[in-house]
Amino acid sequence: MRLKTQAQEPISLITIDIDNFKLINDNFGHARGDEALKRVGAALLAKPGDQAFAARFGGDELLSPFLRSCPMKP
């Protein structure tokens, strides 16, 4: 990402909060919760665009930077 920043290309950052994620961990265990997070991350990376990665930011939050522009509009 440093090279993209130095080239002054836009970078977008998407944050995702998974509603009721605690219920997955409480009802099915943390291994299942981890699998759910991996699936959400994989789905995010499958979208068109130039994502660098998807990372867990908190308990049920994911971050994903797009190194050009975000293909998803609000």
Image (spheres, rainbow, N blue to C red):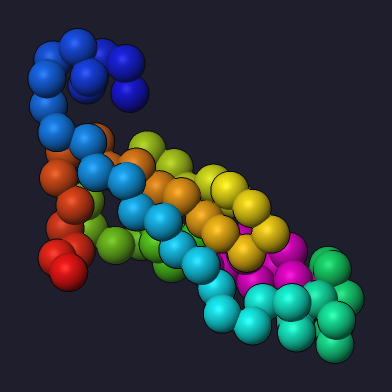
In magenta, the rendered stretch is 32-40
**Which residue is nearer to you in this view: 51 or 64?**
64
Using the image as rendered, state which of residue 58 and residue 46 is in the foreground: 58
Where does the C terminus fall, quadrant-wise? bottom left
Quadrant of the image containing the N terminus: top left
Q: Percent position (x, y) of residue 34?
A: 73, 64
In the image, residue 36 lies in the stretch drawn in magenta: yes
Is residue 61 in view from this perspective?
Answer: yes
Placement of 74 over or under 11, stated as above or below: below
- Which x, y percent locates residue 54? 47, 48
Image quadrant where residue 31 sits: bottom right
> How many numbered dots are placed on residues in this image?
0
Q: Looking at the picture, does residue 3 appear above or below residue 33?
A: above
Q: Is residue 24 left or right of residue 9?
A: right
Q: Is residue 29 above or below residue 70?
A: below
In this view, the residue in front, 23 or 52, is: 23
Q: Is residue 66 left or right of residue 26?
A: left
Give me the residue at 64% from left, 53% from top. Answer: 58
Residue at 32% in and 16% down: 2
Most common secondary structure along the magenta stretch: helix
Q: Indicate yes or no whether the magenta region holds residue 10.
A: no
Q: Position of 53 compared to 66: left or right? A: right
Q: Residue at x 13, y 15 (%)?
A: 7
Residue 50 appearing in the image = no
Is 35 displayed left or right of 15 in the figure?
A: right
Q: Quarter of the image holding residue 21?
A: bottom right
- Tell me the residue at 85%/81% (across/down): 26
